[in-house]
Amino acid sequence: MRLDALVIAPHPDDAELGMGGAILKMIEAGLAVGVLDLTSGEPTPFGSPELRAAETAAATKVLGLPWRENLGLPNRSLEPTLDARKKLASTIRQVKPGWLFAPYWIDAHPDHVAATKLVDDARFWAKLSNTDMPGERWHPERIFNYYCVHLKMHATPAFVLDISEEWEKKFESIHCYQSQFVKGREDLDPSFLDQLHFEAAYWGKSIGVKYGEPFTSREPIGLSGLGELI
């Protein structure tokens, strides 16, 4: 199928954490949205490939995603290699998204940094001609970057999206990943899930709404009008 937006996540759960509200909002607006997880996300302390796949399927159902795939790249050692670039560019050529969403390019997690570099490179390769990659050449119009970082840093987003109406369902999708965010974190106070709630409320407060998600872009963001500004 052809997608309006393709969200590229280093691991299953990153798309939900970083922009689950935006995914819901786009789907509610009638856009075709897909998620491409680059790795299985395993091994982790309390997960397994089978459990993580079941959690991902549950979260996918909550979000109502019509398309989700996994590129099968190695977790914990993700690199923007030529082979990985070709695999991702081939997927882009097949689903032809208008927009790409990638993680923010500064992070403590090497997989996240590598993923952003890989998306930038694959976007360029997807438009090449005279290649053995499947599909027709394609160049997504935009790359937007969502925040799902492992650094205690203050983001400086280009815009914050109002996800007040989508927050509860976003939270439900994140809650599907019990092995990642609940098990082994029982003694945290506040809990990891509570911290996500506080963070969403902080970004919402910054634009005068209940909950928000921050985004940025390396490229300028153009507006055809001011009607959607809060």
Image (cartoon, rainbow, N blue to C red):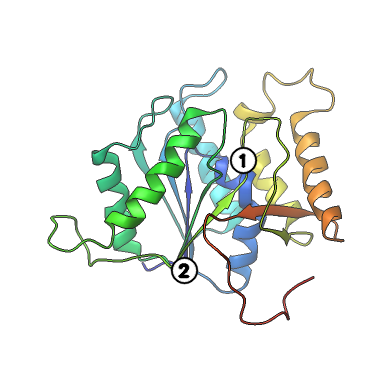
Side of 14 where 162 appears, left or right: right
Comparing 8 with 81, the one in front is 81
How much space separates mark 2 and mark 1, taking CA atoms?
22 Å
In the rendered structure, which amino acid carries the disc numbered 2?
A: Asp
- Could you classify mark 1 by the number of other residues whose Cα lies within 10 Å: few (under 14), some (14-19), or many (20 or more)? many
Question: What is the secondary structure assignment of the residue under circle 1?
Answer: loop
> Percent x, y for residue 57?
51, 45
> Percent x, y for residue 227?
73, 81
Q: Residue at x 30, y 53 (%)?
A: 89
In the rendered structure, which amino acid carries the disc numbered 1?
A: Cys
> Percent x, y for residue 11?
49, 37
The residue identified by callout 1 is 148
Question: What is the secondary structure assignment of the residue under circle 2?
Answer: loop
Side of 107 where 121 appears, left or right: left
The residue identified by callout 2 is 4
Side of 84 where 161 appears, left or right: right
Q: Residue at x 78, y 42 (%)?
A: 199
So how many labels did they put on this image? 2
Using the image, determine if residue 110 lies above or below residue 103. Answer: above
Q: Residue at x 84, y 23 (%)?
A: 189
Q: Earlier in the sequence, mark 2 or mark 1?
A: 2
Q: Which mark is residue 107?
A: none
- Could you classify mark 2 by the number of other residues whose Cα lies within 10 Å: few (under 14), some (14-19), or many (20 or more)? some
Displayed quadrant of residue 81: top left
Displayed quadrant of residue 174: top right
Comparing 74 with 98, the one in front is 98
Looking at the figure, which quarter contains the C terminus?
bottom right
- Select label 2 or label 1 by which is in front: 1
Comparing 49 with 131, the one in front is 131
Looking at the figure, which quarter contains the N terminus?
bottom left
Comparing 20 with 221, the one in front is 221
> Percent x, y for residue 10?
47, 39
